Amino acid sequence: MSGNNSRAMSDSLWEKFRNGSIDAFEEIYQAHARALLSYGRKINSNREIVHDEVHDLFSRLWENRTRLGPTASIKNYLLKALRNSLYKTSQSNNRLNLEYMLFDHEEDFFESRENEIIELEETQTKKKLVKRALVELSKREQEILHLRFFENMTLEEIATVVDVKYQSVKNTSFTAISKLRDFFSDHQD
């Protein structure tokens, strides 16, 4: 499907939602809830808070649908709205925590228990190394990399979501990747 057709479908879905279609609302929820929960947990590690904020976001959307304008991207709109909501919550709770959990699911490719244990130890070592590398990054750098590589957003889309200029996103992304590259080159086996 071409980008224009996809955009037209998204525009149509958003318009139907704004006009009160519960089916369009459910489709938007189904298409974006998982990504919102994932992104939200990168901003705030408290799953209950993130779950509540996503729920509240969709409740506010439904209540205010007639006052909403058109949007260039439903996903970007929702990510930005959740981000703003979580930042407000974190400021009131004074808790902002960006943690990246990589290597969440490891396939079992090994037949023997010994190999499984060795693989688990190696994975845990890698996870620790990745966490140490990410701690070296600023929260902004972590957020931009998450949006870029886990949410597959373009630099332009990221600039819109985090509300900064495109060049700033580009520079921050480059700096973060350079920091990670340097960190891993210093910590090779």
Image (cartoon, grey):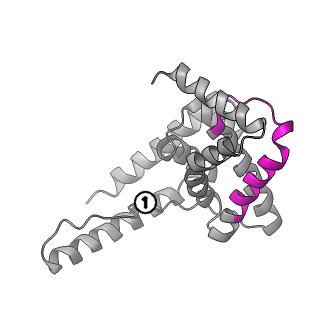
How many callouts does the rendering have?
Answer: 1
Please say whether residue 164 is visible from this viewpoint: no
- Between 9 and 126, the residue placed more toward the observer is 9
Residue 87 to residue 173: above or below: below
Q: Which amino acid, mark 1?
A: Leu
Taking the spot 61% from the left edge, 44% from the top edge, the residue there is: 27
* Location of residue 160 by image quarter: top right
Residue lying furthest left in this view?
A: 112
- Secondary structure of the residue carrying tag 1 is loop
Which quadrant of the rendered structure holds the C terminus? Answer: bottom left
Measured as percent of width and height from the top left, residue 44 is found at 65, 63
Q: Residue 72, position in %: x, y?
A: 67, 28
Q: Is residue 83 above or below residue 115?
A: above
Q: Which residues are magenta?
A: 52-74
Q: Position of residue 174 (x, y in %)?
A: 51, 36
Instruction: Tell which of 90 and 1 is nearer to you.
Output: 1
- Name the residue that disc number 1 marks: 102
Q: Main secondary structure of the magenta part?
A: helix
Residue positioned 40% across, 64% down in the render:
104
